[in-house]
């Protein structure tokens, strides 16, 4: 079985398109280009003959597709970030800066579909799970650090309102309170965690984020939150490149202030593409390990040996060979038998 996998659209171009951006401070971002350009059009190589006819199983096909989709998006994003950085460092006209910023913002708005859902809003790659959104709550740290006993009732609106409650005990530790919160909010895929400074942050599936950001509210017992009415918690999303571009589009003259954020994004993109290249290499090794023959000569030698075995065999051997022909095309059988 032969399987051809081709890149289309943005993914079909090699990384050589980045040569248009030649600023010296960003040369390190082109290192990956030189190493992977030669292999971009031939990935993945296919074995000549496989010992496992169904070698391209569902899991491997999904992994190859994910790699190609994610790389196509990361490549496009990296190119446009470079162009915007150069426009800012060269102090190009504000109109050109705004145009490049808007083009990049439009690309990021399509991130989920273009990357196959494998790149999150912080431009982090994850081929194993869905992208997550990091966010915090106003006075969220006090939510777990206060010692009063209180029952918090959370409500998530939208098409259908859902309710979940957490009972916080008196003088409980912050981590115990966090456990109770996670039990209540976990039904909506919301997971909280404390950092090294005991600051409370949350994560939620990106697909559910619009609902959580607009319709999450809480009712307390008068200690942490008001009693008798639901209070909107107004989640605050972790800032990233999208927020920086929104600021740049409003005030292009202040573009120098977001250069650090752009350079951070560029570094992240380079790291993620390097990680993706390692995934490519592991997938290639897996495919190569499925090949029975290492090259054309070894395959022909095997055919010749098989032909000699049939010619020298008895009636039983020939009968077994003919029975196996039912699974092969007649042309292939004739080629094997005529190999000598």
Image (spheres, helix red, strand yellow):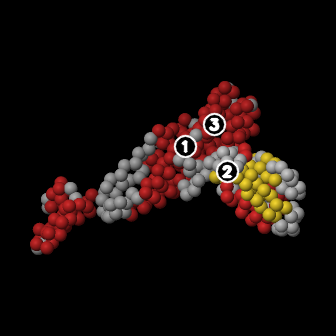
Residue at image mark 1: 113
Classed neighbour count for the residue bearing mark 2: other residues with Cα under 10 Å, few (<14), some (14–19), many (≥20): some
Residue 7, visible in the rendered structure: yes
Indicate which disc residue 332 carries: none
Picture quadrant where residue 57 is located: bottom left
Q: In this image, 303 relative to 148: left or right? A: left
SS at circle 2:
strand
Image coords of residue 280 (percent x, y): 48, 55
Instruction: Reply above or below: 235 against 338.
Output: above
Q: Is residue 179 above or below residue 75?
A: below
Image height of 113 relative to 224, above or below: above
Q: Which residue is mark 3?
A: 105
Going from the N terminus, do you reach mark 1 or mark 3 first?
A: 3
Q: Nearer the viewer, residue 11 or 167?
A: 167
Instruction: Specify the quadrant of the image occupied by residue 48.
Output: bottom left
- Residue 133 is marked as 2
**Residue 163 in the figure: left or right of residue 281:** right
* Residue appearing at x 17%, y 69% in the figure: 320
| Residue drawn at (38%, 53%) of the image | 45
């Amino acid at each position: 079985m032969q399987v051809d996998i081709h890149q289309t659209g943005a993914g079909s171009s090699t990384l050589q398109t980045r040569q248009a951006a030649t600023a010296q401070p960003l040369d390190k971002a082109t290192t990956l280009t030189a190493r992977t350009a030669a292999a971009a059009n031939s990935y993945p190589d296919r074995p000549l003959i496989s010992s496992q006819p169904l070698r391209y199983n569902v899991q491997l096909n999904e992994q190859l597709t994910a790699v190609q989709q994610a790389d196509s998006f990361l490549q496009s994003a990296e190119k446009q970030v470079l162009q915007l950085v150069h426009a800012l460092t060269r102090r190009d006209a504000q109109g050109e800066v705004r145009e490049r910023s808007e083009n990049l913002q439009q690309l990021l708005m399509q991130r989920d579909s273009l990357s196959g859902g494998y790149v999150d809003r912080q431009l982090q790659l994850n081929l194993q799970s869905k992208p997550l959104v990091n966010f915090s709550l106003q006075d969220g740290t006090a939510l777990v650090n206060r010692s009063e006993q209180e029952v918090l009732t959370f409500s998530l609106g939208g098409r259908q309102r859902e309710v979940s409650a957490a009972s916080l005990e008196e003088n409980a530790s912050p981590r115990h309170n966090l456990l109770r919160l996670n039990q209540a909010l976990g039904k909506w895929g919301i997971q909280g965690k404390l950092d090294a400074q005991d600051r409370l942050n949350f994560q939620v599936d990106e697909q559910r984020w619009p609902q959580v950001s607009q319709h999450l509210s809480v009712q307390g017992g008068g200690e942490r939150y008001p009693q008798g009415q639901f209070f909107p918690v107004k989640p605050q999303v972790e800032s990233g490149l999208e927020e920086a571009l929104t600021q740049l589009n409003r005030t292009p003259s202040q573009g120098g202030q977001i250069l650090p954020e752009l350079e951070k994004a560029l570094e992240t993109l380079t790291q993620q593409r390097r990680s993706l290249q390692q995934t490519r290499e592991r997938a290639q090794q897996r495919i190569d390990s499925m090949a029975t023959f290492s090259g054309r000569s070894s395959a022909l030698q095997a055919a010749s040996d098989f032909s000699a075995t049939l010619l020298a065999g008895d009636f039983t051997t020939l009968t077994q060979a003919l029975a196996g022909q039912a699974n092969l095309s007649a042309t292939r059988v004739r080629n094997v038998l005529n190999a000598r």
